[in-house]
Image (spheres, rainbow, N blue to C red):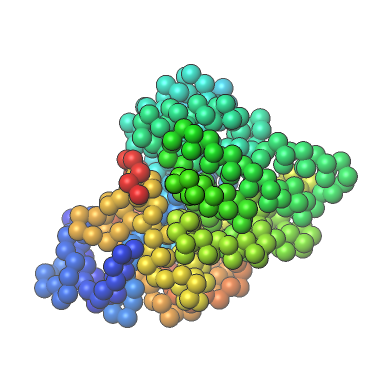
Amino acid sequence: MASLLIKNGRVVTADSDSVCDVLIDGEIIVAIGRNLTESADQVIDAGSKLVLPGGIDPHVHLDMPFMGTFSSDTHETGTRAALHGGTTTVIDFVLQKQGHSLREALTEWQGRATGTAVGDYSFHMAVTDFNEQTRAEIAEMVAEGITSFKAFMAYKGALMIDDAQLVGLMQEVKKHGALVTVHATNGDMIDTLVAQHRAQGKLSPLYHYLSQPEVTEAEASGRFTDIANYTGVNAYIVHLTCEGALNQVREATRRNQRVFVETCIQYLLLDASLYEQDFEGAKYVMSPPLRQKKDQETLWAGINQGLVQVVGTDHCPFLWEQKQLGKHDFSKIPNGHPAIEHRMELLFSEGVSKGRISLQRFVAVTATNAAKIFGMFPRKGTISIGADADLVIIDPQRQHTISAATHHMNVDYSAYEGWELTGKIETVVLRGQVAIREGQAQVEKGYGQFIRRGPTIF
C-alpha cells in the first residue's frame, strides 16, 4: 500500500489545533508531529491550509423509494458528490416495508450499495412494522454492525408506527445497547391539516408548510423524549428544526436525561419565506418544512450550547421533473432536498467564517460527534494514530460560488444557487487514497466500504 505525507497544515480536531504533519501508510494514520522526517510515496504541502477529519453525514436517503418515485442520487452518485464536499462517510436509511422483514429490506439496500458506492457508508434500519418477528431481528442487525434503528411518528400507512410499537422497539433496542432515532412530528395532526387544506382548494407548496406547524414537531419531540426517558434507551432526534422542539430537549435535560439532536444545514440557512414563490417553492418541500428566522437563531445557539450535536443533510434529492408530480397538489410533491455536497462548505462559510461557531465546534458537528454517537469512533471522525486516514484539506480564504451547473449531485437545481462561500475544499483523502483533488474524483465506483458500527460512546 502507498504512503502519503501531509505537511505543514493546521490540523484541527474537536479537541486539538496545531500546525503539524500527518503520515499515512496504506489506509491508516501512523504518525502525527512537527517536521516528520519519514519519506512517503506522495507528499502534499498543506501550508496555510486547514486539515480536518473527513465529514460524516449520518442522514442521507440514496436511491430511496418514496411517494411513487425514487430519490435521484444513487449510492454511486450520492457518495461521489459527498466526497466532493468533504464528506467521506454517510449513513443511509434502510426502510422496512410494512408486512416484510428487516432482513428483506437490508438485502434490497445492500443490492443497491455494494460495489457501487464511491465513499464509505453504513446503514440505519428504519422499523416501520414492529412485531414479534421484527423484535427477533434486532439482535441480528446489531450483530451485523447496524446499531441504530429509526422510528417514524408520521407518514401513516407507509412508515409510521404507533406509540405502543415505539415502546416495544425502544425496549428491545435498549437490551442490545443500540440507539433509537426518530422522525418526530405528529402524523395524525399533519394528515388532518393536509386534508383540510386540500378540501379548501389550498394546493400550493405554501400549504405543505402550513400543514406542519411548529406544534406538530414540538409535541412529537416531547412525547418521544418522555417515552425514551421511561424506557432508558439511547435516543436521537433527526432533522430537528425549531425552537419548540429544541425546548422539549432542553426540558429533558432538567431531569438529567440525555437526548442527542441533529439539525440539518438547510434549517440553519433557509427559511419558510421560500414557500411563497408559487410552484418554485416545491424545491424546498421537505419534512419537516423550513421554519422561521427565530428558529435559525435557536439552532445556531443550540450548537454552541451543546444541545445540538450533529449537522446532517437529510439529503433526499428529486429532479425538477419529479417535483412536478405535485404541481397541482402540494401533498403529491416528493419531499426532499439536495445538500450532501455542500453541507461542510456551507457550514464553514456561514458558521466558522462568519464567527457563529468555532472551528473545533465545526469539526465536532460535522464529523466527531456523529462518529461517537453512531459507533464509529475512533476509526472515523478524528485525526489520530490508528484512525482511518479520512482527511479534508480546506483553503479557508478561497471564495467560490454554488451552482447546479457545477455540482456533482444528480439533481438539476440547487437550493443554494448563486451563494458565494468563503472556504473551499481542495483535497479529500479517503482511507489513505486521494479521493478528490481540485474538483476531480480520483477513486472509482466501488471504492466505498460498508462500515460496521458498534455502540454509542459519546
| Residue beneath the point at 79% across and 60% down | 278
Quadrant hosting residue 19: bottom left
* Left or right position of 354 against 141: right
* Left or right position of 357 against 392: right
Residue 96: x and y in percent read: 52, 31
| Residue beneath the point at 58% across and 73% down | 419
Residue 206: x and y in percent read: 77, 55
Residue 249: x and y in percent read: 53, 49
| Residue beneath the point at 27% across and 51% down | 379
Q: Is residue 378 visible?
A: yes
Q: Is residue 334 visible?
A: no
Position of 278 relative to 94 (above/below): below
| Residue beneath the point at 53% across and 52% down | 250
Position of 341 relative to 334 (above/below): below
Extreme residue in the top direction = 132
The residue closer to the viewer here, 82 or 362, is 362
Residue 104: x and y in percent read: 47, 27
Extreme residue in the right direction = 200
The residue closer to the viewer here, 25 or 349, is 349
Quadrant of image for the N terminus = bottom left
Extreme residue in the front direction = 255
The residue closer to the viewer here, 362 or 444, is 362
How many numbered marks, from 0 up? 0
